[in-house]
Image (cartoon, grey):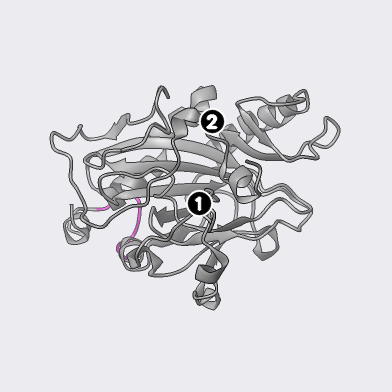
Amino acid sequence: MTPDEILAREPLILSTSQREKYFIDGYLGAASLIDASWLKRLNDVTGEFVELSRTITGRDGRFDLEPDHRADSPRIRRLNSPVEIHDTYWEFASQGPIADVAEDLLGPDVKFHHSKLNFKWSGGGEEVKWHQDIQFWPHTNYDVLTIGVYLSDVDADMAPMGVLPGAHEVPLYDLYDERGQWTGNLREEDVSGLDLSKAEYLGGPAGSITVHNCRAIHGSPPNLSERPRPLLLCAYSAADAIPITSLNRGASHSEAIVRGKPARWARFDPRPCLMPPDWSKGYKSIFAYQQGDQ
């Protein structure tokens, strides 16, 4: 559907101005959209995984841990695919208010793609360098977005996500370095050509959401505050946006229809998309690739 066709539909949860901002700027933020009941459930189960991480020494597919993670001082970069490892996350992603947000911006037929929970731990939790998402998981069109939910209050000192307005309309960038190595971030010379003073940093009280289009340029600095910044991220697509890589192959909820019905026809956008490495050989995380942990 075109933006005009989507905007002509009665919204479920977002305001008209919020939807218009998404289509113009490629992102939006909405304060305190998730209620206290959902927040408690999400924080309770997230706390269980933080405690579980204390027992992890070495590699575990559920966690991406910082190098100095310890039992007495857990430092989690990411909880991988939370919807695959606890029903509460899947219930929220498929039936909670963020599914309404996805429908308001993608139209009546919506698929779930994947999830992750980025912790951005306190006292230097690693930065996420400027990047676009769709090169990690190309689709046949760009009606793909990611909705983030802050599980705790996030102020300017806690490394909220920053997004460049309108950057979803520029050509996609190359996320390989000069040697052909995948880094998952824009090259320094490309970043130097951006006006980062225009970036909007999306924080807010617990329950606030962020939404960004898959082509939007976004990132976040290290978290130098004394509090971690857990951000639950769920990606959705229009039903007629078909993934063309194997990143989520075998995931039980990937490509699940959460609103409406499956598409009978794939829709193709003529704008090209960079292809990532062959993820069937293994995928780490954006943190690992950007920090050079190859």
Label whose residue precedes the other's in the sequence (2 or 1): 2
Residue 86 in sight from this viewpoint: no
x, y percent for residue 269: 21, 53
* Residue ID for mark 2: 82
Nearer to us in this view, 45 or 72? 72
- The residue that appears at 36% across and 40% down in the rendered structure is 99
In depth, the one of 155 and 12 nearer the eye is 155
Query: In front here: 51 or 18?
Result: 51
The 10 Å Cα crowd at callout 1, few under 14, some 14 to 19, many 20 or more, is few
Front one among 98 and 222: 222
Residue 228 percent coordinates (x, y): 71, 48
The extreme front residue here reads: 179
Residue extending furthest toward the right: 72
Residue 35 shows in the view? yes
Q: Is residue 235 magenta?
A: no
Question: Residue at point 33% right, 52% down?
Answer: 273
Question: In the drawing, does residue 128 fall left or right of residue 59?
Answer: left
Q: Position of residue 259 (x, y in %)?
A: 27, 36
- Label 2: which secondary element: helix
Q: Is residue 36 above or below residue 47?
A: below
* Residue numbers of the magenta segment: 11-17
Residue 98 % position (x, y)? 41, 43
* Rendered image: mark on residue 180: 1
User: In the image, is 259 to the left or to the right of 57?
Assistant: left
Q: Amino acid under label 2?
A: Pro
